[in-house]
Image (cartoon, rainbow, N blue to C red):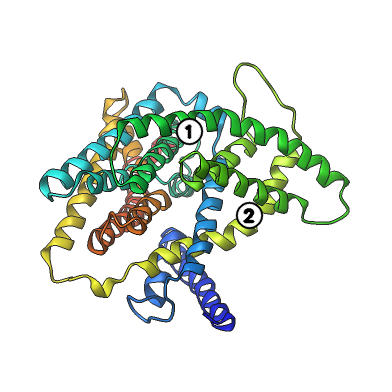
Amino acid sequence: MEVHFFFLQLLTVLLAARVFAEFTVNLGAPSVLGELLAGIFIGPSLLGWVEPDEILKLLAEIGIILLLFEVGLKTDGERLLHSGIKSTIVAVSGFIYPMLLGFSVAYWLFDQSMLVSLFIGGTITATSIGITVRVLEDIKCLQSHEGQVVLGAAVLDDIFGVVLLAILFDFSMSGDISFFNIGKVLLFMGVFFAVAPITAKFIAIYIQRLDDRSEIPGVIPTTIVSLVLFFSWISHILGAPELLGGFAAGLALSRRFFIPFGLSISTHKMCAQCIEEQMKPIIQLFTPIFFVYIGLSLNLREIDWGSPFIWGFSMIFFTVAVIGKMIGPFFLKESILSKWAIGMAMVPRGEIGLIFTELGRISGILNNEIHAGMVIVIVMTTLLPPLVMKWYHANYASHLCD
């Protein structure tokens, strides 16, 4: 590809992502849906202006690593520690039931292979904490009892999702399901999460000192991006997805990161704030490219929309995705209104689900039809629950947020 033509394609991707994101946000939907629609609109599905080539794929991979860095950066380690038994019940059940139901339906009802079924089950497990938090803030329920249970559960849910993603990544690389490999991945991840965050915390101290002494602007974004890329490389060497390194770096550099066993590392609170503020423009630049790339990779023209399979597949797994998340709160000793409120807040999927589907697609495990069906499921579980939550609290459960 000639350089000037790539510049035109990148310009189209960035502008389309922004325009469609603004449009969907104005409609009350998450920006991620707009970015996904932008890829569908400018890609092979409709206009055919941009093709998903290797250069855009590389930029998209940088975007997803930085996205997971942001997820880790916003993870409240103290809340994770003190999330309590209620959040744990909601998180564990919200992870296990969608996974088991999704796998069972794919394996026995749709006669898919075990590996494909695992990817389908994994795709509908993770709650989008970003979308959930945004909706809870909009309806002023973030600080309510139900909001705190949901936040703690969503944090745990993100951790479980990343672990499952690492395991499925290993399956996609080897093309085989091995309990030995599962143990190896879990061991590597345990060591990585034990050592990497502490290492990153010490490195952050020197980054802070360097920033204080340097007369050249840009020390923090340069060093933090370098740290994220280094951790991603280490993660790959250990046999886990590169994005796991981004998550670990973000977790360590978050404002509320703590180290067990009473060990404390004193860092200036403003340093964490500076990292978050100075990294935000870089993250906001690269992350939309990932979601647009998913839309570009989804060629809707190759799908037989007249086939009952795609509609039956999507509707069945949408139902499975909702039911799987709604089960957990009914194990809690709460009012029926609270149980429904917590369950609905756990339903929204988003970026993590799209990461699962994209990993399945690029590894050749999910064909175009199944990949499209799962993207439809993610879109529906991302778009509809926030609207239902707002309606539910406005008409039935407004007192829960008092």
Q: Are marks 1 and 2 in contact (CB under 8 Å)?
A: no
The residue depicted at 29 percent of the width and 37 percent of the height is: 340
Query: Is any part of residue 126 visible from this angle?
Result: no
Name the residue tied to disc 2.
Answer: 280
Return the residue nearer the eye: 100 or 182.
Answer: 182
Label 2, residues with CA under 10 Å away: few <14, some 14-19, many ≥20: some
Q: Position of residue 59 (x, y in %)?
A: 53, 63
In the picture, measured across the screen, residue 48 lies left or right of residue 81, that is left
Image coordinates for residue 169, horizontal then vertical, percent: 38, 45
User: Cα distance, mark 1 to mark 2?
Assistant: 27 Å
Look at label 2 and name its amino acid: Lys
- Which residue is at the far top? 261
Q: Position of residue 317 (x, y in %)?
A: 21, 50
Question: Which residue is identified by label 1?
Answer: 189
Q: Is residue 132 left or right of residue 1?
A: left
Please tell me whether mark 2 sits on a helix, a strand or a loop.
helix
- Which quarter of the figure has residue 263? top right
Report the front residue among 92 and 299: 299
- Is 251 positioned to the left or the right of 173 in the image? right
Report the residue at 21% width, 42% height from top: 103
Q: Residue 18: give x, y in percent of width and height.
A: 52, 69
Q: Earlier in the sequence, mark 1 or mark 2?
A: 1
Q: Secondary structure at mark 1?
A: helix
The three-letter amino acid code for the residue at tag 1 is Met
Above or below residue 366? Residue 192 is: above
Front: mark 1 or 2: 1
